[in-house]
Amino acid sequence: MKFLLGTKKNMTEVFDEKGTVHPVTVIETGKLVVTRVKKSSEKDGYDAVQLGFGTRKVKNINKAQQGQFKDLGNFKKVKEFRTEGESELKVGDAIESSIFAEGDTVEVSAISKGKGFQGVIKRHGFKGGPRSHGQKHSERAPGSIGTAGIQRVIKGMRMGGRMGNDRVTVKNLKVIKIDPKNNVIMISGAIPGRRGTLVEIKG
């Protein structure tokens, strides 16, 4: 399994050799360093690879992680990826964007934009009440939410509430272009999150 971490930059368009335009999301990647390898045969109980990404000041890293990282670097983010069987990677190995090739199909995960508390029209796509016959303050109201028999709100009722800020995974996206010199990888379509969101890429 291939995996990569990066930060979302922006969206743009890229033309291929045939002149077809592709909407892409630009992801800025960097050097990933393997900080730990977990093995099911040992006390961990499962196979996984832990990667460090980005940099930050030493004072902002707890002492437990400082002892784990040692001379590997001062990482801003640490993510763990499950592997099928024991990985051949070792602690200290580096992973770069060149691990993927143009045309590869990938799966991308990120935290979506937080939209705060929203009503049922924006959150669930309700059409709202009628705009006539004396309707004054209930155009965006949810309508009836209870029942006559059990006299309580049923679990799972679509109502207003917090929207966004969820982990979203988008599958079957294609790698359109890779620029190893500038640590940039361009992936087709839209990817969840705002600019600067940490993005996980798996292939």
Image: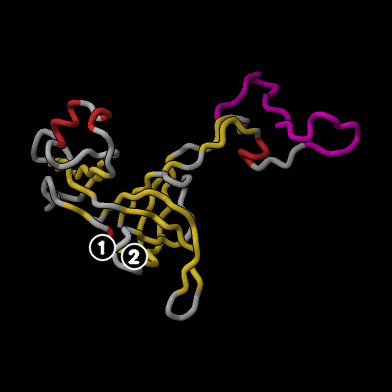
Which quadrant holds the C terminus?
Answer: bottom left
Position of 184 compared to 158: left or right? Answer: left
Q: Position of residue 32 (x, y in %)?
A: 23, 49
Residue stretch in magenta: 129-156
Position of 37 compared to 127: left or right? Answer: left
Q: Which mark is residue 178?
A: 2
Position of 62 compared to 12: left or right? Answer: left
Tell me the crowding category of disc 1: few under 14, some 14 to 19, or many 20 or more residues within 10 angstroms, Cα based: some
The foreground one among 172 and 6 is 6
Task: Find the residue positioned furthest to the left.
Answer: 42
Q: Is residue 124 magenta?
A: no
Q: Is residue 150 magenta?
A: yes
Q: Do the numbered discs 1 and 2 sit on residues whose CB atoms are within 8 Å?
A: yes
Q: Which mark is residue 164?
A: none
The foreground one among 58 and 93 is 58
Tell me the crowding category of disc 2: few under 14, some 14 to 19, or many 20 or more residues within 10 angstroms, Cα based: some
The residue shown at (23%, 43%) is: 52
The residue shown at (27%, 44%) is: 53
The residue shown at (18%, 41%) is: 73
Position of 162 compared to 130: left or right? Answer: left
The foreground one among 116 and 149 is 116
- The residue pinned by badge 1 equals 98
Above or below residue 61? Residue 79 is: below
- Secondary structure of the residue carrying tag 1 is helix
Instruction: Of the two numbered discs 1 and 2 on the same chain, state the one appearing first in sequence.
Output: 1
Above or below residue 75? Residue 188 is: below
Type of residue at label 2? Ile
Q: Position of residue 98 (x, y in %)?
A: 25, 63
Which quadrant holds the N terminus?
Answer: bottom left
Above or below residue 22? Residue 54 is: above
